[in-house]
């Protein structure tokens, strides 16, 4: 049997992260950083996973059943390594439960340009690409909407509650608006953005710590939920403001009013800070971007936790100050990426 390659884009949430989990609008875009999964046959039974070159991180292990499963790489602890790639493991379990797959040896090789735990959709990209590649490999359906729904189910199973934004972007690419729990694809102009990522997972970190950080989104979502329940009347107004902000931002992009768009990004960042998802290190990157001339800047994605090292990313609309912003972020220790919005979504191909 030949090999299957599935490739998906990273995402940047422009407006509405966290609020979308509670039915508010969110606007997101695919960006030109991609994750690729290649599925092929293997002589031995079970699933052999290679994480080849996700920035600053890599491992190999066999995802066999815990009962009697043997380690192909004894220098890695099997149980903790399984936690570190919880999304891959849950994807396989989900597909085995819902589709007729398995029963033979499969190798899954993952390579990526998307930093882990950076708010750029690495978990959703992993789910979508792995599901697409395995469904194509086993011939159990490859329609895009089915893949998106499967991937969203996996994310919810791992995180407890998950926005449909990330899996929609990984699947469809371009821009998507989440409104009334529906995913709407949009045609919008391409934007040049600067992303600063800080605290992505280092190769030297032990596997247990890696597992903890890899699932930080779940913890952040849970903490927001707890604060919302404690301060329900206050949070209701914040969430309504975020919903209106997304609607105004969409109109600003359609009119190419980038000054207003940047101002709305700054407001969105303030709302995210108010619900407690902006750690000090990411807040400093946002301020640096604004002070260096950005039209607007904000945390993108889940945000971060100071007790987890403040890992995550900020998004800046640079205007005429791109070089100055990039230098400032690099001096602050961030991994800096020039990105373009509207990247193509899921691509699959068969090859020998």
Image (cartoon, rainbow, N blue to C red):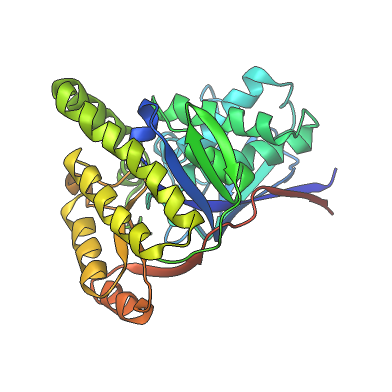
- The residue closer to the viewer here, 250 or 41, is 250
Task: Report the quarter where the N terminus lies.
Answer: top right
- The residue closer to the viewer here, 219 or 275, is 275
| Quarter of the figure with residue 230 | top left
- What percent of the width, then of the height, locates residue 340? 52, 65
| Quarter of the figure with residue 234 | top left
| Quarter of the figure with residue 327 | bottom left
- The residue closer to the viewer here, 178 or 71, is 178
Asked if one can make out residue 136 in the rendered structure from this viewpoint, the answer is yes
Task: Report the quarter where the C terminus lies.
Answer: bottom right
Reply above or below: 339 against 241. Answer: below
Asked if one can make out residue 71 in the rendered structure from this viewpoint, the answer is no
Residue at 39 percent across and 33 percent down: it is 20
Residue at 46 percent across and 35 percent down: it is 86
Residue at 61 percent across and 34 percent down: it is 148
Residue extending farthest top: 97
Q: Is residue 228 left or right of residue 242?
A: left
Residue at 30 percent across and 45 percent down: it is 209
Reply above or below: 182 against 106. Answer: above
Q: Is residue 140 left or right of residue 344?
A: right
Q: Is residue 181 left or right of residue 104?
A: left
- The residue closer to the viewer here, 305 or 30, is 30
Reply above or below: 279 against 69. Answer: below
- What percent of the width, then of the height, locates residue 27? 45, 44
């Amino acid at each position: 049997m030949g090999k299957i390659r599935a490739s998906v884009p990273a995402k940047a949430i422009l407006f509405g992260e966290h609020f979308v989990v509670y039915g508010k609008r969110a606007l997101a875009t695919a960006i030109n950083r991609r994750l690729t999964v290649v599925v092929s046959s293997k002589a031995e039974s079970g699933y052999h996973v290679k994480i080849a070159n996700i920035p600053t991180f890599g491992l190999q292990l066999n995802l066999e059943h815990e009962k009697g499963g043997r380690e192909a790489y004894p220098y890695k602890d099997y149980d903790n390594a399984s936690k570190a790639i919880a999304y891959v493991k849950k994807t396989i379990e989900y597909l085995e439960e819902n589709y007729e797959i398995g029963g033979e040896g499969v190798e899954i090789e993952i390579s990526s340009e998307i930093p882990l735990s950076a708010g750029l959709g690495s978990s959703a990209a992993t789910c979508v690409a792995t599901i697409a590649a395995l469904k194509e490999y086993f011939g159990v359906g490859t329609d895009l909407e089915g893949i998106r729904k499967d991937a969203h189910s996996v994310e919810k199973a791992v995180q407890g509650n998950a926005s449909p934004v990330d899996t929609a972007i990984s699947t469809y690419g371009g821009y998507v608006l989440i409104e009334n729990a529906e995913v709407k694809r949009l045609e919008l102009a391409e934007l040049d953005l600067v992303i600063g990522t800080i605290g992505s997972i280092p190769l030297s970190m032990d596997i247990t710590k890696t597992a903890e950080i890899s699932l930080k989104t779940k913890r952040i979502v849970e903490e927001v939920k707890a604060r919302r329940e404690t301060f329900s009347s206050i949070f209701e107004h914040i969430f309504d403001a975020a919903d209106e902000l997304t609607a105004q931002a969409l109109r600003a992009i359609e009119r190419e009013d980038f000054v207003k768009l940047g101002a709305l990004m700054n407001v969105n960042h303030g709302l995210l800070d108010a619900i407690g998802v902006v750690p000090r290190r990411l807040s400093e990157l946002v301020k640096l971007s604004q002070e260096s001339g950005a039209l607007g800047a904000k945390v993108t994605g889940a945000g971060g936790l100071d007790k987890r090292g403040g890992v995550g990313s900020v998004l800046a609309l640079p205007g005429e100050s791109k070089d100055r912003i990039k230098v400032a972020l690099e001096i602050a220790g961030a991994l800096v990426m020039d990105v373009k919005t509207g990247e193509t979504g899921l691509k699959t191909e068969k090859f020998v």
